[in-house]
Amino acid sequence: MTMVTGHVGGAGLDTDTLLMMLEALGDFVGHELTPQRQLDLDHDDVCPEDIVRAMSDPNQLGVQLVFVPEAYGGMDGGAFDSYRICEVMARHDIGLATAVFATFLGSDPILVGATDEQRQRWLRAIAEDGIVFAYGATEPDAGSDLGAMKTTAARIEDDDGVVTGYRINGRKQWISNGSIADMITVLAMAPDGPSWFVVPNDTPGFAAASPEDKHGIRLSNTAALFLDDVEVPADHLIGEVEGRGLVQAQQVFGYTRIMVAAFGLGGGWEALDRAIAYALERKQGGAPLAEKQGFNHKLIVPHAIRLEAARSYIEDTAEKIDDGLGEDGAMNTEGAIAKLMATEAGNAAADAAIQAHGGYGYTREYVVEKIKRDVRITTIYEGTSEIMEMTIARDRWQHHLKTGGAYYRDRAAQLAQLHQRSPTVGADVAALASQALAAVLEACRAARLTRNQHVLFRLGDLICHAECADVLARRAARTLDGAAHAKSPDRFDGPTLAVMSRIFAREAAQKVGQEGARWVAGALAPDSADVGPMLATIPHDAIRTAQTGLVADMDHVADVLYDRA
């Protein structure tokens, strides 16, 4: 079954409508969630259910309308629209953003797998009544491995053997909106395989535990769910056919991971912007911190650049999904790359923001410590960073094998051509990263090194950096040509993005070349094949030469960041 047009492949909102929605979202949350209330709720570990429901109410904000197709009463927003909304929500509060995201995630099995009658019933309830959903997949002993679930759904049959309902038994863990949701989509093992069911929260036998006492996102409601002989009608089986649950879950990972990536992006930029503002005011040694090159080059500039590299990949993936390339899970690896880069960059940026504030950063009043606690979850939920690395490595490893090693060599050649057309964006250096990656992968093939799980993890990280360097260079070139995406924030102009792209390309090339060679050498066994000739094709000298001008470029980015603050 393919996805509904408009959810991940539609034209989406027009630019003016999106911008109005973003403005309304910022105004609404800013009014309802004052800084003091936010700190109090975080301290008391309370989810502001009134705000969550008001945001979902079509007569108030109605943010959920963006995620629902027009055919079911929604606004037919696309993946790009969703990314922008998630980023803005995350800049206000990732916990609150998680509550909104949970309804979208909970409705996903309905959207991709339900009958039209089921969609009309439940998606319209989201769009027109603002009901809140939860997504009941994770279990205490299964984590990210959905296939290891223990929750069961036994058939209930009448005297003629006709299935009239299902009796569900099991437990779910770490469920966002768990104890405030009106409806929960529950993944359970039916006789013919994993299947999704819609369970109303007032069904006998259903119960939610007290909310978890979490490290961060304390404004979100997270609770365990208990299902003891919970009976639902047969038409609450999503799609009314058993055994399609895992396929339905896999179909949307590319899209949902874009949204979590946007949380990492928004949280990271919010923390970094606070550090930039603080650096302009805080004087040390007779001058503002903003004038200290070492401070900027360690705690500000690298994080801004990694966040924009992540944004580039998020936008590229969202555009492809909106163009119809994300059906049946086709963009799951791209979603994993976007999530890995954005959430790790956001987490690192928030950590650097605490350091930039010194002792003040460690106090609640300055908020960056809260952002750090909040953004940390983005590297865990909707697939941990390690799952992302494995997903990326396995997929791109197959591309390498199927093309006889040409996959990244071809990307390097395309980047070299881009350099001829746009010589200031660092495409030539990004090409070195892809060239080095091709050599590393070929060495892994010859010596059969991917039998080592750790090697796969490291390959996933290297692939992520090489592809983000590629996409950032292309974004910078388009922006220089006046062809930036109309819905993308215009924080940086073409020349600045070109400088950022050069810096990140240097980092990616250095990382892939040095770390790739290190892990190949580290995984070799005494009887391994000779991979020396392959490693010799890593362009170490060219990568080293490409670092020329790095400090001057970082100085330029620092100036732009403070000028725009």
Image (cartoon, helix red, strand yellow):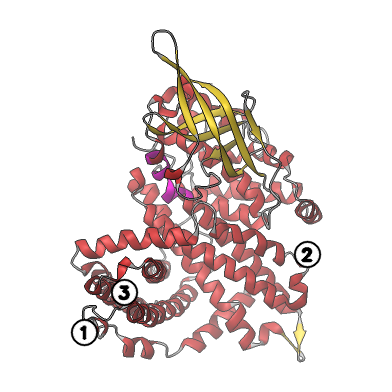
CB contact under 8 Å: marks 2 and 3: no
Residue 289 position, x and y percent, is: 70, 83
Mark identifier at residue 559:
none
Mark linked to residue 533: 1
What segment is highlighted magenta in the picture? 247-256
- 402 left or right of 26 in image: left
* Position of residue 51 in the picture relative to residue 153 (left or right): right
Q: Main secondary structure of the magenta part?
A: helix
The amino acid type found where label 3 is placed reads Leu
Residue extending furthest toward the front: 526
Percent coordinates x, y for residue 431 in the rendering:
31, 76
- How many angstroms separate mark 2 from mark 3 (CA)? 43 Å
* Res 458 quadrant in image: bottom left
The picture places residue 186, in percent across and down from the top left corner, at 52, 34
Rounded to the nearest angstrom, the CA distance separating label 1 from label 3 is 14 Å
Give above or below for 134 relative to 301. above
Circle 1 residues within 10 Å: few <14, some 14–19, many ≥20: few
Q: Is residue 270 magenta?
A: no
Cα distance, mark 1 to mark 2? Answer: 55 Å
The tag earlier along the polypeptide, 1 or 3, is 3
Check residue 437 in the rendering and tell me which mark sits there, or answer none.
Answer: 3
Residue in the foreground of this view, choosing between 408 and 204: 204
Q: Residue at x 51, y 73 (%)?
A: 305
The residue that disc 2 covers is 364
Identify the amino acid type marked 2: Arg
| Quarter of the rendering occupied by the N terminus | top left
